[in-house]
Image (cartoon, helix red, strand yellow):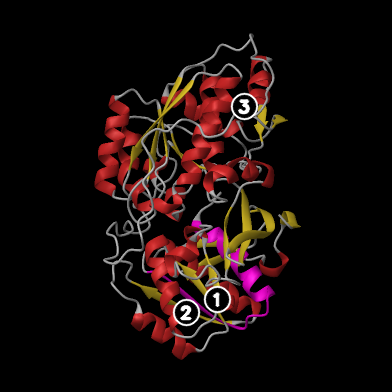
């Protein structure tokens, strides 16, 4: 029997910060299994693409130069012995979530530019995962053969699941900004895996807080019939019931050509709000079918895999207002950092702050370890984000390290404070809404994930 845990603070969420507009004991994890459960919690998501796709999004050129100037920073610290670090980045440049890849990729280049501007020595080499486990394995092996010391990514949980054993066997640290499967919190081969994004179930209270808070009393959740979609749906429906609302989950096969049967079932349920937990291509197809069935955009709430300022173009390229009133709830960075990327990503900041923080954390771990040895870096990770002197950039943190001080890195995505499983214990989320064809933020939320009461689902 599989058991999942989630906090149910609901409408009384323990918010660290919410604004309108715009723990563990820190002991060093061993490089050997930390838990007894070696079986991943679910099969990887299907990697096949839907048979019908919207107009293609231009594929980025391989390894582009950083598109923004690094921020002004202090002079390099001569007392710090700089460790040269090679990062291999596995991004979905093609495949079903390729339209979402640009923010994380550009944030990675920006992090490297910021680090090297203050005397760091970091290189970043990219490879396309195609959101396909087999292709991702080849990409990781190629990056390692070319000398990568650590891996950034992959993006999707299924792709991460495909490469995690290889990285465990070779003792290669790995940081993902977007792989949200709960399985990575418990499986034994995740000893070298860290992520700057919370597990997928932790967004469920945020969704419920927003949807129920806007007056919904009968909510349909329609999502992929894979681990991420089902996990979010199960937790959200349970929490909606706790709030007094009625709800039902409708799972779909993401490889299907149409979703008429699921949309018809949703229509028969007669909801006053609909939450869509889909990937980009299948999710846009579901949105299109829901609108054609007569549901208004104001009734629709999407999760972060649907975050894209030009989402409307994939639904109806002739009507910029087609999604006006739709809400997207997902992972976000802090506003100052988001503004640095907006000009080059057309306002798309999804998982960008988390990617930036991954690279800074990997670079700081190498500096603390004094090498790129995987075990030494692994030992350094737990203490980077808590228990020391607070610092907000690589430059400031490196200066503290050079002075012999412990550090507490507060990232551009907010505080992280890793637990023993390598998960952040603070979640940074944004609530976005389409108005006049533009996707703008309505509020930002940081949630202390250690403060929730626990709900057990069997």
Q: Is residue 56 left or right of residue 450?
A: left
Q: According to the image, label 1 marks what residue?
A: 297
Query: Could you say where residue 11 lies in the image, as x and y percent from the top left?
Result: 70, 69
Q: Is residue 153 left or right of residue 333?
A: left
Q: According to the image, label 2 marks what residue?
A: 291
Quadrant of res 317: bottom left
Q: Residues within 10 Å of mark 3 (few under 14, many from 20)?
A: many
Secondary structure at badge 3 equals: helix
**Over which residues does the magenta segment extend?**
200-224
Q: Residue at x 31, y 40 (%)?
A: 165
Query: Could you say where residue 427 lies in the image, as x and y percent from the top left?
Result: 61, 51
Is residue 15 positioned above or below 394 on the image? below
Quadrant for the C terminus, please. Answer: bottom left
Q: Residue at x 24, y 46 (%)?
A: 134
Q: Is residue 302 left or right of residue 79?
A: left
Quadrant of res 263: bottom left
Disc 1 versus disc 2: distance between alpha carbons? 7 Å
Q: Residue at x 47, y 48 (%)?
A: 178
Magenta stretch: includes residue 50: no
Query: Could you say where residue 25 lies in the image, as x and y percent from the top left?
Result: 62, 38
């Amino acid at each position: 029997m599989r058991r999942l845990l989630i906090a149910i603070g609901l409408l009384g969420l323990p918010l660290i910060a919410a604004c309108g507009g715009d723990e563990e004991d820190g002991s060093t994890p061993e490089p050997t299994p930390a838990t007894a459960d070696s079986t991943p919690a679910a099969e990887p998501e299907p990697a096949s693409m839907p048979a019908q796709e919207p107009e293609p999004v231009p594929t980025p050129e391989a390894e582009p130069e950083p598109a923004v100037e690094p921020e002004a920073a202090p002079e390099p610290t001569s007392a710090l012995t700089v460790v040269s670090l090679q990062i291999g980045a596995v991004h979905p440049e093609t495949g079903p979530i390729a339209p979402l890849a640009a923010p994380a990729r550009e944030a990675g280049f920006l992090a490297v530019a910021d680090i090297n501007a203050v005397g760091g020595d970091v290189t970043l080499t990219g490879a396309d995962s195609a959101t396909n486990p087999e292709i991702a394995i080849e990409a990781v092996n190629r990056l390692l053969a070319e000398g990568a010391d650590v891996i950034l990514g992959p993006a999707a949980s299924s792709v991460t699941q495909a490469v995690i054993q290889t990285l465990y066997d070779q003792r290669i640290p790995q940081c993902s900004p977007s792989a949200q499967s709960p399985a990575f919190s418990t499986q034994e081969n995740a000893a070298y895996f860290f992520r700057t994004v919370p597990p997928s179930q932790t967004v469920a209270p945020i969704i419920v807080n927003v949807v129920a808070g806007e007056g919904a009393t009968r909510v349909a959740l329609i999502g992929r019939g894979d681990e991420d979609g089902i996990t979010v749906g199960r937790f959200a429906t349970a929490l909606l019931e706790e709030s007094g609302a009625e709800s039902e989950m409708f799972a779909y096969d993401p490889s299907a050509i149409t979703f008429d049967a699921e949309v018809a079932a949703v229509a028969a349920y007669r909801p006053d709000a609909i939450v869509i937990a889909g990937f980009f291509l299948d999710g846009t197809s579901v949105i299109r079918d829901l609108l054609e069935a007569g549901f208004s955009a104001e009734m629709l709430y999407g999760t972060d895999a649907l975050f894209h300022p030009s989402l409307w173009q994939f639904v109806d390229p002739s009507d910029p207002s087609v999604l006006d009133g739709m809400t997207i709830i997902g992972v976000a960075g802090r506003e100052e950092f988001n503004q640095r990327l907006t000009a080059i990503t057309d306002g798309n900041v999804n998982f960008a702050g988390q990617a930036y923080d991954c690279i800074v954390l990997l670079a700081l771990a190498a500096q603390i370890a004094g090498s790129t040895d995987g075990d030494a870096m692994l030992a350094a990770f737990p203490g980077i984000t808590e228990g020391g002197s607070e610092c907000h950039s690589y430059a400031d943190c490196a200066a503290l390290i050079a002075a012999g001080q412990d550090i507490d890195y507060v990232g551009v995505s907010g505080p992280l404070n890793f637990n023993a499983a390598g998960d952040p214990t603070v979640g940074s989320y944004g609530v976005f809404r389409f108005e006049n064809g533009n996707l703008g933020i309505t509020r930002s939320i940081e949630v202390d994930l250690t403060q929730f009461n626990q709900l057990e689902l069997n």
